[in-house]
Image (cartoon, rainbow, N blue to C red):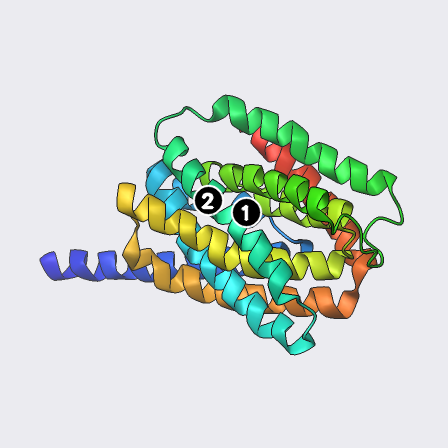
Amino acid sequence: MKKTLARLYKLMDYNNQIILFIISFFANLFSAFAGGGAGLIQLPALLFLGLPFSVALGTHKLASVALGVGATLRHLREKSLDLRFALFILGTGVPGVIIGAHIILDVPDRWAEVALGCLTISLGVYSWLKPSLGQQTVVINRNRQGYVIGGTVLFLIGVLNGSLTSGTGLFVTLWLVRWFGLEYKRAVAYTLILVGMFWNGAGALTLGLLSEIRWDWLPALLLGSLLGGYAGAHLSIIKGNYWIKRVYELITVIIGLKLILG
């Protein structure tokens, strides 16, 4: 009887690993293509499988680091990123992420999710109403004032990234497009590499120190994030700005509705 139960538990764990991999792969594929939103699928799945919210959030963020790794492996081949600009995004966003990760452990987040959902939908609507937005790079707001305003907003998005679950990468993508004039393809590259790998890494480390992480679920999640991130980054490169823009608009509306409806 004990042997039968042990085999059953092992089979259930094996099936969970397969489910986690499939969920992680497709969540991160769409995220890598649109520039954010992996948490829409991955985090609810972890909650459904029985993890407490703080554990699920930390596990999700750590797994999402592999999304950044996978996307980095693909985007670095294009050699389209500016190191100084990348360091600027890191320097302004990571402190906000750490602050936000502390906030989420003490503050009920339902009201914030509804507000964030409405704001996320507005991102997609705004992009849809601006047909030429992000279709080509136009260098703007690269003076001192522009960097101060741009960095302040990235810091605030970092706070949201550390404290909430879904869609904050989409905020970074649109902000890079709207404020700094990047095309969608390049903005998505910055978002995936810097938000996916470093912002989420900082959030996962903070939550891991303050809460806990489900380590035995990470192999499947990390592998799915890595492969999904690479595949999604490849699709975004070959499909171009028009399709990235359209998928971005669709993902923002879906995520916004998900946040509002709970």
Q: The residue tagged with tag 2: helix, strand or loop? A: helix
Front residue (pair 252, 72)? 72
Residue furthest toward the right?
132
Secondary element under disc 1, as helix, strand or loop, is helix
Q: Is residue 70 left or right of residue 48?
A: right
- Other residues around mark 1 within 10 Å, as few (<14) / some (14–19) / many (≥20): many
- Note whether 216 is above or below 74 in the view shown: above
Asked if the residue under mark 2 is in contact with the one under mark 1, i.e. CB atoms within 8 Å, the reply is yes
Residue beneath the point at 62% across and 31% down: 117
Place of residue 88 in the rendered image (x, y in percent of width and height, measured from the top left): 59, 54
| Along the line of sight, the residue nearer the viewer: 245 or 27 | 245
Q: Give residue 18's quadrant in the image.
A: bottom left
> Is there any visible trace of residue 51 in the rendered image?
no
Residue at 53% from the left image edge and 68% from the top image edge:
70
Q: Position of residue 60 (x, y in %)?
A: 42, 50
- Identity, as a three-letter code, of the amino acid under mark 1: Thr
**Residue 8: image x %, image y %?**
24, 58
Q: Which residue is mark 2?
A: 95
The residue carrying mark 1 is 92
Of 89 and 240, the residue lying toward us: 89
Instruction: Name the spot of residue 235 as percent of width and height, x first.
Output: 70, 67
Q: Classify residue 19 by image quadrant.
A: bottom left
* Residue type indicated by callout 2: Pro
- Other residues around mark 2 within 10 Å, as few (<14) / some (14–19) / many (≥20): some
**Going by the picture, which residue comes out furthest to the top?**
111
Identify the residue at the far front of this view: 144
Residue at image location 25% in from the left, 61% down from the top: 10
Marks 1 and 2 sit apart, C-alpha to C-alpha, by: 7 Å
User: Which of the numbered marks, if any, corresponds to residue 165?
Assistant: none
| Residue name at image x 35 percent, y 38 percent | 54
253 horizontally vs 49: left or right = right
